[in-house]
Image (cartoon, rainbow, N blue to C red):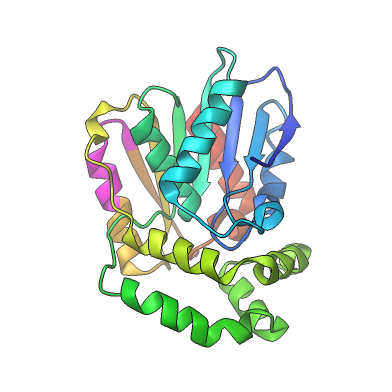
Amino acid sequence: MHVKEYGNKEGPLLLFLHGGGVGGWMWGKQVDYFTDYHCLVPTLQGHGERSAESSFSIKGNALEIIELIEERKNGREVNIVGFSIGAQITLAIISLAPTLVQSAVINSALVLPMKMAIPFIAPAIKLTAPFIKNRTFSKIQAKQLYIDDLYFEQYYEDSVKMSLYTLIEMLQENMGYELPKNTSDTTTRILVTVGDKEKGVMKESAEKIMVSYQDCSCVVISKVGHGFSFAQPERFNRLIEEWIH
């Protein structure tokens, strides 16, 4: 596994799990802020430095990250922040290791499967594949995630490097994900966030997560869509800090 480390290596663990199609670089303004924590930023399967890999699974990523935590934990508190598919992976970690994580922030996680759409993912991606390397198209995609000029080149580079098969598998995993059955087993404190400009299914997913876990709160973020940490990084950081404490 490829992982970058920041901050105080003696401090509590704080893991940041990036979304699909982006990379660990998306957390630049978070690792600069949380200097009192030992920040770990793994690269998910098939992304960035792991773009040579041709497969992607939520459970596979979750198992890798559990192993990483167990290697680095050393008796310390563990906190995880996940965005989009990284948030789905965080939920999978909590299910597979219910007592491992003290607190988690689930930012924009889809948990209501869109099964009718899954058969159309592969043909749609193959049809639109030529646009992926088009900078104008990438600019439009980046804008939807609030990715500015500071991060655009990294976003574009990672988009071009990603395998078509990884992209298809990732979208199939993302759109087919549903909450595990053992939600009552976890001891993790969970904060769910969703933007008020996100699609209805994302808001419904946030509500479903909130009612499914015993120690869970939800915050709807005003004036933002899918990409809270990019759109309002200072507010995002303060919210994480307040939740952990």
* Residue 106 showing in the rendered view: no
213 or 223: nearer the viewer: 213
Residue at point 62% right, 85% down?
Answer: 131
Residue 62 is covered by the magenta coloring? no
* Residue 13 showing in the rendered view: yes
The total number of labels drawn is: 0
Q: Position of residue 142 (x, y in %)?
A: 63, 72
Residue at point 42% right, 36% down?
Answer: 93
Please identify the dominant SS of the magenta region: helix
126 or 108: nearer the viewer: 126
Q: Position of residue 159 (x, y in %)?
A: 65, 69
Q: Is residue 72 left or right of residue 184?
A: right
Residue at point 63% right, 79% down?
Answer: 132
Q: Residue furthest top?
A: 75
Give above or below for 212 relative to 184.
below
Q: Is residue 73 left or right of residue 181?
A: right
Q: Which residues are magenta?
A: 207-216
- The quarter holding residue 32 reads top right
Q: Position of residue 177 (x, y in %)?
A: 33, 55
Residue at point 49% right, 79% down?
Answer: 125
Q: Position of residue 60 (x, y in %)?
A: 46, 44
201 or 42: nearer the viewer: 42
Quadrant into which the N terminus falls: top right
